[in-house]
Image (cartoon, rainbow, N blue to C red):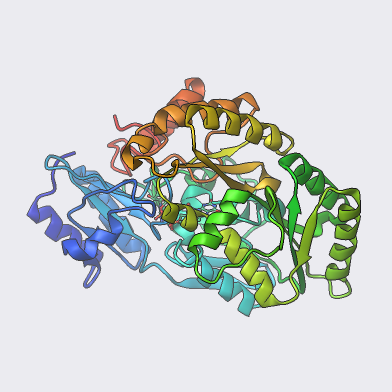
Amino acid sequence: MTAVSSQQLAELKALAGPGAHVEDPAELAASLTEWRGLFRGAAPLLLMPDSTAAVSAILAYCHQQRIAVVPQGGNTGLVGGAIPHSTAERSEILLSARRLNRIRHLDAANYSITAEAGCVLATLQAAAADAGRLFPLSLAAEGSCQLGGNLSTNAGGTAVLRFGTTRELVLGLEVVLPDGRVLDSLRSLRKDNTGYDLKQLFIGAEGTLGFITAASCKLFPQPRQTATAWLAVPDVAAALRLYSAARDSLGDELTAFEFANRCSLAFVIKHIPGSRAPLAADSPWQVLLEVSTARESADTGADLERFLADMLEQGTVTDGMVAASGAQRDALWRLRHSMSEAQKIEGASIKHDISVPVSKVGEFVVRASAWAEAAVPGVRVVAFGHLGDGNVHFNLSQPVGADRSAFLARWDEIAAQIHQIAVDFGGSFSAEHGIGSLKVAELERWRGGTTLELMRAIKAVLDPHGIMNPGKLLRAR
Ligand SMILES: Cc1cc2nc3c(=O)[nH]c(=O)nc-3n(C[C@H](O)[C@H](O)[C@H](O)COP(=O)(O)OP(=O)(O)OC[C@H]3O[C@@H](n4cnc5c(N)ncnc54)[C@H](O)[C@@H]3O)c2cc1C
């Protein structure tokens, strides 16, 4: 692949259609840096076609001309996957889904929605709610991230415990392959045993195998009752006891079980205007627990109150409150959703998105914290995440007054050790954010051998010229 000529740029703009490109550097800037500011890229052109046919024509041309393409959704990814890296010798074009933003069909009776990849997640949630249905995918970036990005990263979020990751919500997919062919598996069927389930290849592929243009996703009954509690627990072991007891006692109505350490909440209170600690006393760990049901006859609030009274009596929980209104519930979720943002404001941080079996979360946190505090004196452990999924965002904020660059320079050394600890507990170095540019070497380290060989073989078959998101997930060849 080489630098794109002005002739090629003109042809690409024509293929995208009128008003479907950005090339002004000032306008392009927002698409060239990611949320945390860790990656800054370059691209001569961003294309924003509004039809599958136009995406197909663009990719067919890029395939033929050997032009690299970086798919981009809402650009909220946290591993640099949507950032292009053009150089003087080699250009990468940004292909944005932002104008592919139609809801094609909502079938309430089939509990499904068919939507284009550029639909913002919050828009999909609202469309489902308007039809009396629930689209359960939910994450802090839902006001900006797009369905195509959610699919390509197999996003997790706060309702995985009950509804699974994005992958588990997908019924069908429409994908434009790197050579411009369209793979149409946009069916809305619960059962369809017709050989290899090809759509699965593109979910979590981070734009390296094709460009997703639309998907059909599952919907669920809209909850009629929701009860949300903020609880203090002395340690992660107690949080785990609480989790097991909640599953036993509240059953499938347990929808979310999030946890956070003291520092995670303290940074939110310090940096996010309008936030207040929900409980009077400070606690080393807190849990945000939510139950919801579509059953009209249920009394979710009373069930939760009874359960919490038991937990307080046993000493598993030391303090707690149940949201008394929708506004209070929103305020509790805002605290949880603001943790990444607050940590960014506090200073540099080295982040890990690990998972371990749920039963091992406590041991992981204890061992990883001890190692980090010894390796980086004064480091502040900011641990929070989706306890019910065994997913810990085990983040380290720089010691107060430390040099930002010197701290960040230790990223690889520290990450290698934290990932090792996760793997020692049977875990993964990448739970929900994916590989992108950030974790290519880690993927090679932990998923070598047959797994990596097969991944490369699949990439070579679908994208023989390596034009799709080169260097992301797999090293460019
Ligand atoms: C505050 C905050 C909280 C977050 N919380 C969570 C969380 O709880 N759980 C979680 O999983 N993630 C979380 N994320 C990460 C991020 O929001 C998700 O990864 C999200 O799914 C990315 O969607 P996007 O549209 O922004 O994708 P982008 O960032 O634009 O792209 C992500 C990847 O997908 C590829 N891609 C995008 N669109 C397409 C397409 N149409 N076809 C093919 N490839 C495509 C890109 O090339 C890139 O590799 C959070 C991020 C932020 C900033």
Which residue sits at x=48%, y=20%? 449
* Image location of residue 435, percent across then percent down: 44, 39
In percent of the image, x 73 and y 42: which residue is there?
A: 235
In this image, 46 relative to 227: left or right? left
Left or right: where 211 falls relative to 107 = left
Which residue shows up at 37% across the image and 62% down it? 97
Q: As displayed, is residue 112 above or below residue 5?
A: below
Which quadrant of the figure contains the C terminus?
A: top left
Q: Is residue 94 above or below residue 422?
A: below
Q: At which x and y percent is residue 334?
A: 58, 66
Find residue 143 and report its horizontal and vertical position in percent. 48, 67
Q: Is residue 12 left or right of residue 285?
A: left
Question: Residue at the left extreme?
Answer: 6
Q: Is residue 22 visible?
A: no
Number of labels in the image equals 0
**Foreground residue among 92 and 284:** 284
* Quarter in which the N terminus is drawn: top left
